[in-house]
Amino acid sequence: MLGDLLLERGAIKKGNFVLSSGKTSDSSADLKEFCTDVSNLRIIVDRFSEEVKCDAVAGVELGAVPLVVGVALKLGLPYTIIRKERSHGNTSLIIGENISGKNVAILEDVVTTGGSVLKAVSLLREKGAIVTDVYCVLDREDGGSDALEHAGVKLHPLLRISEVFRK
């Protein structure tokens, strides 16, 4: 059902695309605009809220921000946003409460190779957080799960790309 909705609303497309990792793919997944529709966002937040077990949630700007805020509000949890880079003003890459000693679940829209979420895991662990789980809407099944497992983190996707195009 979620896969069909993502296809119908254009969040997942077939074609020839260059991904942020630099790899080419026959599909594209961009959930940012999809999540600006609150009915779509509610579906994802509700699904994550059923699965997430933690003291706080975190996510990398930009795609994960509505997911993190939605789950934090629904479950009454503190949240943290991880910036990709910062060269002016407050240069901290982490925005939010003290997470030291807290079990922090990372939420992500799409995981491909796992590169950006592994950076988030590292940053949060440097601040004393306990990070063992990443929850994503879509696993593109391009090595991200294995890379996270290698870092001691389990990936929990709501959907895998192979499930979307199985038909």
Image (cartoon, helix red, strand yellow):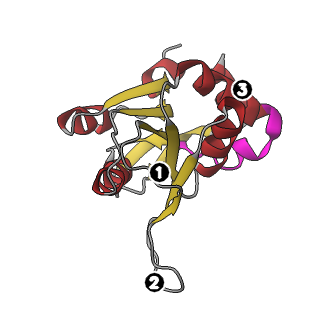
Q: Which mark is residue 17?
A: 1
Q: For residue 87, which numbered disc appears in the image? A: 2
Q: Is residue 21 above or below residue 154?
A: below
Q: Is residue 31 visible?
A: no
What's drawn in magenta, residue-wise?
Answer: 28-39
Q: Secondary structure at mark 1?
A: strand
Spatial CA distance of label 3 from label 1 is 27 Å
Q: Please identify, in this view, whether the residue under mark 3 or under mark 2 is nearer the observer.
A: 2
Where does the image place residue 167, in percent across and percent down from the top left?
53, 13
Please rate how many residues cluster around mark 1, counting C-alpha atoms within 10 Å: few if below 14, some from 14 to 19, many from 20.
some
Sequence-earlier tag: 3 or 2: 3
As measured in the structure, the alpha-carbon distance from the residue carrying label 1 to the one carrying label 2 is 30 Å
- What element does badge 3 sit on? helix
Q: From this viewpoint, which residue is outermost toward the left? A: 150
Dot label at residue 43? 3
Return the x and y of residue 28 as percentages of the image width and height. 52, 43
Q: Where's the N terminus, which quadrant? A: top right
Instruction: Give the CA separation, mark 3 to mark 2.
Output: 35 Å
> Between 42 and 95, which is closer to the camera in this rendering?
95
Is residue 66 shown left or right of residue 123? Answer: right
Q: In terms of sequence position, does the residue under pointer 1 or pointer 2 come before the other?
A: 1
